[in-house]
Image (tube, helix red, strand yellow):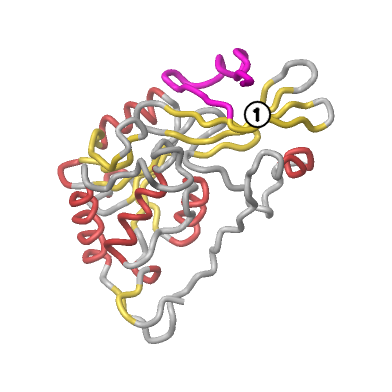
Amino acid sequence: MTEVPSTILERLGSGQTAVLVEKTTVGTDTLYKLNVTSEDEGGQLVAKVDQAGNITFPLSDAGVLQADPRDDIGSDLKSALDSLKIPEVTVDLDWKAAAGATFLTKQQLDTKLADEAKACVNTLLTGDVPGTDHGNLACAWAVNEVARRALRRPIGGGLSTASMYLVLKAKHQPVKRADAIPGHVIISPTEGANIGHVGIVGDNGQVYSNSSSLQKFYNKYTLDTWQAHYGDSKGLQVLFYQLDPSQFPLSGAIS
């Protein structure tokens, strides 16, 4: 079995381990698709090594990699997507509820999502979720599943946190940390080889999210410890979003 080159491993964030999933060559470049995990977060990335040994990470995600065909990711990477088994998926940013639908208030939505997240702690198991490497890549799936149970439809993005982030930016309301309340979504988007995470804010500053190592939804983090780990230690953004009730109809057809 081909090993992950040590030069790539050296570029990964502290505490992250990598397993080779696929490998291909494009011209003089070698591309490696990796599953990267740590205790709490997991994701996939593509490492590109050129003829001179230079390493870049042109595609990465906390969750399962998807390539949006609208993105300018370079012709070499686009030509390698099939070999690396990375699907091209266009994120639907135009979804609207059917005419006649009714909706929760923002307060009602926040309460329902926070209550469901709390109910899912230690009971929402992710080890058997298809396509998530036994729960290692289930951070986006878990948050989407909590939303589906609470609000009748997921936030969006499937297994991809990067795709979920696109939906959050396009369809939902950003809030400052000082204004974050239970039921808001917290997300630290992946940057390069630095894998991020996504969760749901709960009572008393708790944060509920998937654990890659425990393969379940649980509440290890608080707002302070999330900031310390993902913001201060890993250097990632820490962003908050209030979900828009118009994306989660109470009644009427979900089109």
Q: Is residue 162 magenta?
A: no
Q: Is residue 193 left or right of residue 181?
A: right
Q: Position of residue 70 (x, y in %)?
A: 68, 54
Q: Where 10 sits versus 69, above or below?
A: above
> Residue 73 lies in what quarter of the image?
top right
- The main secondary structure of the magenta stretch is loop
Which sits in the foreground, 249 or 231? Answer: 249
**Residue lying furthest front in this view?**
1
Q: Position of residue 190 (x, y in %)?
A: 50, 36
* Quarter of the rendering occupied by the N terminus: top right
**Residue lying furthest left in this view?**
204
Callout count:
1
Give the amino acid type for the residue marked by disc 1 in the picture. Tyr
> Residue 29 lies in what quarter of the image?
top right
Q: Within 10 Å of the Cα at label 1, are there few (<14), some (14-19), or many (20+) other Cα atoms?
A: many
**Residue lying furthest right in this view?**
27
Q: Position of residue 111 (x, y in %)?
A: 20, 60
Q: Position of residue 90 (x, y in %)?
A: 61, 58
Where disc 1 sits, the SS reads strand
In the image, the segment drawn in magenta is: 1-20
Q: Where 93 sits versus 169, above or below?
A: below
Q: Where 175 sits versus 15, above or below?
A: below
What residue does disc 1 label? 32
Q: Residue at x 26, y 70 (%)?
A: 105
Q: Residue at x 40, y 33 (%)?
A: 41
Q: Residue at x 54, y 69 (%)?
A: 94
